[in-house]
Image: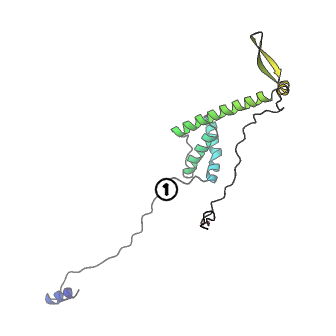
Amino acid sequence: MAWYKARLRKNGGQAGFMLELYIYVPKPVEPTTTLRRATAARIQEQMPRVAGLLREQGIAAGPATQNYMAVTQARLPDGAPLAVPDNTTFRQLQQVDAQQAAMDEATQGDQQLANAEYHLVRVKIQDVPVAMQVNISDIRAALGLPSYSLRPPFRPPTEVATSAPAGHMDDIDHLDS
């Protein structure tokens, strides 16, 4: 700065004019994300809409398919139109739901068969297989089995609340004594 002033005095006091300006410009607003978090409340909010759309379009969908579609719809912004996904995940879940329905139907049929009073049993009489209706309670009594089915219906596992692991515990089992 001192050399600058000395040069001004030597050349007659005229120097280039310099003006420093500071301009404050507002930061541009970044667009909000288009995807939202699929919370449980938003998923439950979408479930009736999804079920109605699938029923309206005649698409076979079980609980896994409906849940997937509700989750994908819950991630979209409010007011987004409902659309049936056309991806492999959706088709795979439709297959999973179809297989689950078939297994449920087979299990229900097996349970009805187990609860029936008479069953068809094949017996060989003089080396000829003969199918005959036999009273199940008589067979159970003859074999010494209980009077109830030994194959209970499927019961899903109960939900057990697991507490969070404790932190910074003293290891008393491995102390040097």
Would residue 90 be found to the left or right of residue 20 on screen? right
Q: Is residue 164 above or below residue 4?
A: above
Residue at image position (82%, 20%) is: 134
| Total marks placed | 1
Q: Residue furthest toward the front?
A: 177
Residue at image position (45%, 61%) is: 30
The C terminus lies in which quarter of the figure?
A: bottom right
The location of residue 31, given as percent across then percent down, is: 46, 58
Determine if residue 86 is in view: no
Q: Please tell me in which quadrant of the rendered image residue 98 appears.
A: top right
Residue at image position (82%, 33%) is: 148
Residue type for callout 1 = Thr
Towards the viewer: 77 or 147: 147
Would residue 168 be found to the left or right of residue 123 on screen? left
Q: Is residue 176 above or below residue 162?
A: below
Towards the viewer: 156 or 174: 174
Q: Please tell me in which quadrant of the rendered image residue 111 appears.
A: top right
Please name the residue that numbered disc 1 is placed on.
Answer: 33
The location of residue 138, given as percent across then percent down, is: 85, 24
Towards the viewer: 127 or 51: 127
Give the color scheme: rainbow, by chain, secondary structure or one colour. rainbow
Q: Residue furthest toward the left?
A: 11
The location of residue 80, given as percent across then percent down, is: 55, 48
Would residue 177 be found to the left or right of residue 106 on screen? left
Determine if residue 142 is in view: yes
Residue at image position (19%, 87%) is: 3
| Secondary structure beneath label 1 | loop
The N terminus lies in which quarter of the figure?
A: bottom left
- Bin the neighbour count of mark 1 within 10 Å (Cα to Cα): few under 14, some 14-19, many 20 and up: few
Towards the viewer: 37 or 108: 108
